[in-house]
Image (cartoon, rainbow, N blue to C red):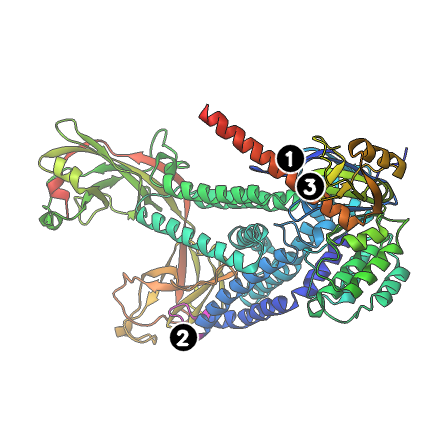
């Protein structure tokens, strides 16, 4: 049986009244590139910190490279690389000094790869980290996390605030490692992620709304648009898989989140809208899917909150 | 081990300026300190310089310790080292190695050099040097390590340190306010034990778990325990733990003199706003064996009025020596006690039944060490090396760590100059005691304590000490500590008040 790179079950983290993670269950296959996406405050960093044993879970379990996260410390970390946008670096060190310092900690440190990364990233060995730009510091951190060829590389918002050139260089550095290293990264940079992630998970308000392969995700999402007779009505109940439904005169638009084939979808539309015609099914980018999910989730949440509030008012009056 | 050395090297590189500063100050202290050893009468510029370097050294060490811990800081989630294959115990060991190499080892080396320069053998005093390192750990290293381990930055540590110092001053104030109360002899050892045990556990715990909140609780528990021990133990019955009750045949007998009193002046009583009344209780001391003396270290008084109203004091300090056989002879021994004004007002009108308890140290004279007054250093057993100083006209002694035991010094002293003549016959007698010069402190950094003979001459001569004159040093050592009590006596408080 292949050991999963990451496996969590009902992982929960609470801070007094705030639930940062609510029963997250996910698995990451070895060699995959797993992108964790979600809006700010969704719990991405908390999940990563739990995986890295930087803070304990309130309940649930998590394993990294087959090991419970509570045991991830010391020598275990010579198989796991970690780079975070917030991580502090020993800024008094030079780039060369940083790599010299890190090298003895890792039995698998690859001097050849170190030289290659220094060249590829154009890192100045004799410059102190505190004298470098944010992008260069991030490159140094990447070099320090890649040179020992980790089995798992965990990246928390690695591209945040970087210019496109640096992003490309870093992504290229990661692409070169794909296969030998499992990548688990959180990011807002959906366009870049889409280019190389094999799996994606969507986290919102501490809950993992979906976690699947990128190809599956791309295949099941379509932007759908068709014309109807303006005089025709709208069915009272629409399929749950139809997100962001909107109708403007004769034009109907929605995001199909369970798209199978065009024929199946046309049949479904025809059942609900007998006058429908000229249906078009447009593949969606990860960014569009992300936005559709985020907007729908917020609308549903707002509706639920409003219902709860009105229920409470009625209850109060009763 | 290689990881420990690797982290150690990294810290040494990062903190090279701090290391350089501490070592420079240490060397400067080592240069100035021996020059101040002849200042056993007053403090000279060398003495003040040496003391200034001692204070600077503590500050430099403090900065070094805080910076050392915070180069790989513990609180928070974004530290660089926490996601690297660094074993917590190796990180802690690397910090320990750093302190050993750059703090303890240079200090031990300096102390060995100073001992050598002071004329003392180094090897026999190594245990005392190690004890001094333990004390340094308890008062400086461990408290600062714990503070640095639960704070994120140097500034934050300084703020917490400031708060801790304010707390410390408050504790000192409390200790001062309760200063009359007898402190248990074990109090300092107990407090040092608390600091070392809890704070070292806190540091290890924080490195192992990085549970900052819990570690702060451990540090707070230490502070609370220190305050509690300082607040509740002095003056309580626990203050006399270690003072045995004599089973039979007590080596001294103490009673309250209840004969005719010379009469009290009662000057305190004229001021109604005086909160306490001082009572001078005359004592009759008898059965003191030759060569033995008794030092009153603590006392407690029980008063009972004719109407059954009773009052009992706490155990108070008493620093006097029981020397006279009987109060009735001359200016005998007294117990000086203070009682609240309200108690005096309640009892002062008539006679009261008084009983006193004492915590007494029995001192035995050691065999006299006979030698001659000499400008060359002479090793006096139990005291240290002593020599006549022409500059100060008295004898200066150097001891290893701390104040020397009480030594009485006797010699011949002429009426005029040292040259013998029929009209200038020297008189023999005790000229004084060896006492450490006050206000000079090297904060445990120097192993050599200087002291001089303070003249308390009972010899009717005012001439100088003469080189070549026979001189004897008689030390006293405590042979046992006793808890004694007087029989109940009936006295009038008015006769004792303000006497």
Relative to the observer, which residue lies in front, A111 or B144?
A: A111
Q: Is residue B43 magenta?
A: yes
Relative to the observer, which residue lies in front, A77 or A277?
A: A277
Q: Taking A301 as reference, is A169 left or right?
A: right
Q: Which image quadrant for residue B497? A: top left
Q: Main secondary structure of the magenta part?
A: loop
Secondary element type, mark 3: helix
Dot 3: chain letter = A
The residues colored magenta run B37-45
Residue A79 rendering spot, x and y as whole percentages: 82, 47
In the rendering, which numbered label is found on residue A296? 3
Relative to the observer, which residue lies in front, B240 or A80?
A: A80
Q: Tell if the residue under mark 3 belongs to the same chain as the one under mark 1.
A: yes
Secondary element type, mark 2: loop
Dot 2: chain letter = B
Q: To which residue does mark 2 refer?
A: B390
Q: Is residue A301 magenta?
A: no
Between the residue at mark 3 and the residue at mark 2, the CA separation in whole angstroms equals 98 Å
Please, is residue B262 above or below residue B165 in the view?
A: above
Q: Could you tell me how many numbered marks the image carries?
A: 3
Please, is residue B136 above or below residue B243 in the view?
A: below
Name the mark nearer the viewer: 2 or 1: 1
Between the residue at mark 2 and the residue at mark 1, the CA separation in whole angstroms equals 77 Å
Q: To which residue does mark 1 refer?
A: A58
Residue A217 rendering spot, x and y as whole percentages: 83, 42
């Amino acid at each position: 049986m292949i050991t999963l790179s990451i496996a969590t079950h009902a992982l929960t983290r609470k801070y007094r009244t705030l639930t940062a993670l609510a029963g997250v269950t996910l698995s990451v296959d070895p060699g995959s590139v797993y992108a964790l996406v979600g809006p700010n405050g969704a719990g991405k960093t908390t999940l990563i910190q739990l995986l890295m044993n930087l803070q304990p879970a309130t309940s649930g379990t998590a394993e990294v490279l087959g090991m419970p996260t509570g045991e991830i410390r010391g020598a275990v970390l010579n198989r796991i690389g970690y780079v975070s946008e917030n991580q502090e670096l020993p800024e008094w060190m030079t780039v060369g000094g940083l790599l010299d310092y890190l090298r003895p900690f890792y039995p698998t440190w690859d001097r050849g790869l170190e030289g290659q990364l220094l060249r590829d990233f154009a890192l100045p060995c004799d410059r102190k980290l505190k004298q470098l730009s944010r992008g260069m510091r991030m490159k140094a951190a990447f070099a320090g996390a890649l040179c020992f060829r980790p089995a798992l590389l965990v990246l928390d918002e690695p591209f945040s605030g970087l210019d496109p050139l640096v992003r490309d260089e870093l992504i290229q550095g990661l692409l070169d490692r794909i296969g030998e290293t499992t990548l688990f990264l959180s990011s807002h940079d959906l366009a870049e992620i889409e280019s190389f992630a094999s799996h994606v998970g969507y986290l919102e308000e501490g809950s993992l709304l979906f976690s699947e392969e990128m190809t599956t995700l791309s295949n099941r999402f379509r932007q759908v648009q068709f014309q109807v007779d303006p005089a025709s009505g709208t069915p009272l109940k629409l399929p749950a898989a139809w997100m962001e439904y909107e109708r403007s005169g004769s034009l109907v638009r929605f995001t199909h989140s369970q798209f199978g084939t065009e024929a199946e979808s046309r049949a479904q539309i025809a059942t609900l809208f007998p006058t429908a015609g000229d249906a078009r099914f447009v593949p969606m980018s990860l960014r569009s899917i992300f936005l559709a999910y985020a907007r729908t989730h917020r609308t549903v949440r707002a509706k639920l909150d409003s219902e709860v509030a009105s229920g409470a008012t009625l209850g109060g009056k009763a | 081990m290689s990881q420990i050395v690797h982290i150690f090297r990294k810290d040494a590189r990062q903190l090279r300026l701090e290391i350089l500063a501490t070592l420079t100050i240490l060397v400067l202290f080592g240069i100035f300190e021996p020059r101040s050893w002849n200042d056993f009468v007053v403090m000279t510029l060398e003495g003040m310089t040496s003391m200034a370097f001692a204070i600077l050294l503590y500050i430099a060490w403090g900065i070094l310790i805080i910076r050392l811990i915070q180069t790989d800081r513990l609180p928070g989630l974004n530290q660089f080292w926490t996601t690297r294959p660094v074993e917590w115990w190796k990180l802690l060991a690397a910090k320990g190695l750093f302190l050993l190499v750059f703090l303890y080892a240079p200090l031990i080396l300096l102390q060995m050099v100073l001992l050598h320069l002071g004329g003392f053998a180094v090897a026999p005093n190594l245990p005392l040097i190690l004890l001094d390192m333990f004390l340094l750990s308890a008062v400086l290293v461990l408290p600062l390590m714990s503070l640095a381990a639960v704070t994120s930055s140097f500034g934050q540590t300084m703020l917490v340190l400031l708060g801790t110092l304010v707390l410390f001053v408050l504790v000192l104030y409390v200790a001062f306010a309760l200063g009359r109360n007898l402190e248990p002899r074990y109090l300092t050892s107990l407090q040092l034990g608390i600091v070392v045990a809890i704070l070292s556990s806190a540091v290890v715990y924080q490195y192992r778990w990085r549970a900052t909140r819990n570690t702060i609780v451990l540090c707070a528990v230490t502070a609370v325990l220190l305050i509690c021990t300082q607040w509740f133990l002095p003056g309580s019955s626990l203050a006399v733990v270690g003072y045995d009750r004599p089973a039979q045949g007590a080596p001294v007998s103490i009673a309250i003199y209840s004969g005719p009193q010379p009469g009290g002046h009662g000057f305190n009583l004229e001021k109604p706003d005086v909160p306490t009344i001082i009572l001078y209780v005359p004592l009759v001391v008898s059965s003191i064996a030759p060569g033995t003396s008794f030092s009153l270290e603590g006392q407690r008084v029980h008063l009972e009025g004719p109407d059954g109203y009773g009052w009992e004091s706490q155990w108070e300090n008493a620093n006097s020596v029981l020397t006279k056989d009987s109060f009735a002879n001359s200016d005998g021994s007294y117990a000086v006690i203070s009682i609240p004004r309200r108690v005096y007002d309640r009892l002062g009108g008539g006679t009261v039944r008084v009983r006193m308890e004492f915590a007494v140290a029995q001192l035995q004279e050691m065999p006299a060490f006979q030698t001659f007054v000499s400008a060359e250093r002479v090793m006096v057993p139990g005291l240290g090396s002593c020599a006549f100083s022409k500059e100060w006209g008295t004898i200066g002694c150097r001891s290893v760590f701390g104040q020397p035991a009480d030594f009485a010094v006797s010699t011949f002293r002429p009426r005029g100059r040292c040259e013998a003549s029929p009209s200038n016959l020297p008189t023999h007698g005790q000229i004084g005691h060896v006492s450490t010069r006050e206000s000079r402190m090297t904060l445990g950094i120097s192993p050599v304590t200087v002291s001089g003979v303070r003249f308390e001459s009972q010899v009717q001569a005012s001439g100088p000490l003469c080189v070549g004159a026979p001189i004897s040093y008689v030390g006293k050592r405590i042979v046992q500590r006793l808890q004694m009590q007087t029989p109940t006596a009936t006295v009038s408080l008015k006769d004792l008040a303000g006497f």
